[in-house]
Image (tube, rainbow, N blue to C red):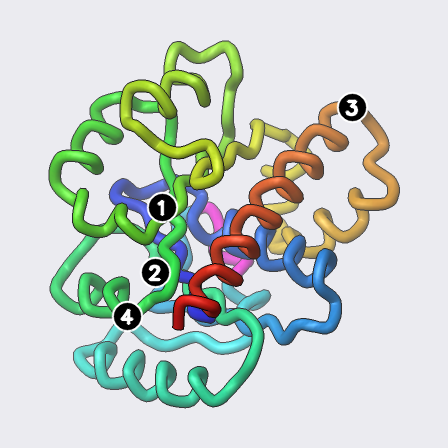
Amino acid sequence: MKIAFWSEAGHSGTTSNMLAVSTMVSAISPGSRVTLRSLGKPERAEGKKEREITHTVGHTSNERQSAERMSKEEKAQSGYVFLDCGSGLDACKRHILSQADIIVVNVRQREEELNRLFLEHRCLLAKSMVLVGNYCEQSEISRRYLEHMYRIEPEHLGVVSYNSEFYQACLRGRVRHFVKSRQDHPGCMRNSLFIRELEQFAQRLMIQAERKSIQG
């Protein structure tokens, strides 16, 4: 099952969100094979996280051929393949996203970005889930607002509230360590909320992946 993490706008937490969600999926389903892939460079301010990704495909003129070769290899493997597609949408990324089973669209609580996403890239949203990083419940663009205004089904939407400890873990390249360590010992209510939201989204993602597998 190939799951692509992508964002229309930069600095949407695509890389850190992928690492956190994939870690949670591994925790929920320890028997599943989880593979991480990256196209090009992680987002700025997340550079150290590149070393956490098991295999990196350079952003070269042969990117499409490399991605297609990976796709053939991954079809022979069971489990989950998480692919960090970064931000922006050129012809190559459009092709790669079209080959993914599920697209996790990473967004911020900014109406102009959301409007552009739903106006210009609606074709990608049919097989997408939406993940709001650095989520603030007090924002006008809340979870309920997204469900009502943009017609996002609740089971296709997830939020991860802003967490300063998680942000510091991102900067140090310790996303997976943070998630694993806070699962059993959150230490505070803020971390408990973070882990609960992350687990909810990971479970919804796995449900969607199971449905895709059944549909073939």
The reply to whether dot 2 and dot 1 touch (C-beta < 8 Å) is: no
Measured as percent of width and height from the top left, residue 157 is found at: 45, 36
Residue beneath label 2, please? 85
Label 4 CA crowd tier, 10 Å (few <14, some 14–19, many 20+): some
Three-letter code for the amino acid on which mark 1 is drawn: Val
CA gap, disc 3 to disc 4? 39 Å
Q: Residues within 10 Å of mark 3 (few under 14, many from 20)?
A: few
Q: Nearer the viewer, mark 2 or mark 4?
A: 4
For mark 1, give the secondary structure: strand
> Is there any visible trace of residue 171 in the rendered image?
no
Labels 2 and 1: the sequence-earlier one: 2
Q: Circle 3 sits on which residue?
A: 189
**Gap between marks 3 and 2, in whole Å?**
32 Å
Residue at horizontal 43 percent and vertical 63 percent from the top:
212
Residue at figure coordinates x 64%, y 51% from the top left: 175
Which residue matches tag 4? 99
What is the C-alpha distance between the residues marked 4 and 1? 15 Å
Residue that carries the numbered disc 1 in the rendered image: 105
Q: CA distance from mark 2 to mark 1?
A: 10 Å
Pointer 1 local density, CA inside 10 Å: few below 14, some 14–19, many at least 20: many
Q: Is residue 94 above or below residue 196?
A: below
Residue 71's tag is none
- Compared across the picture, whether 89 is left or right of 186 comes to left
Q: Which residues are magenta?
A: 45-49
Quadrant location, the C terminus: bottom left
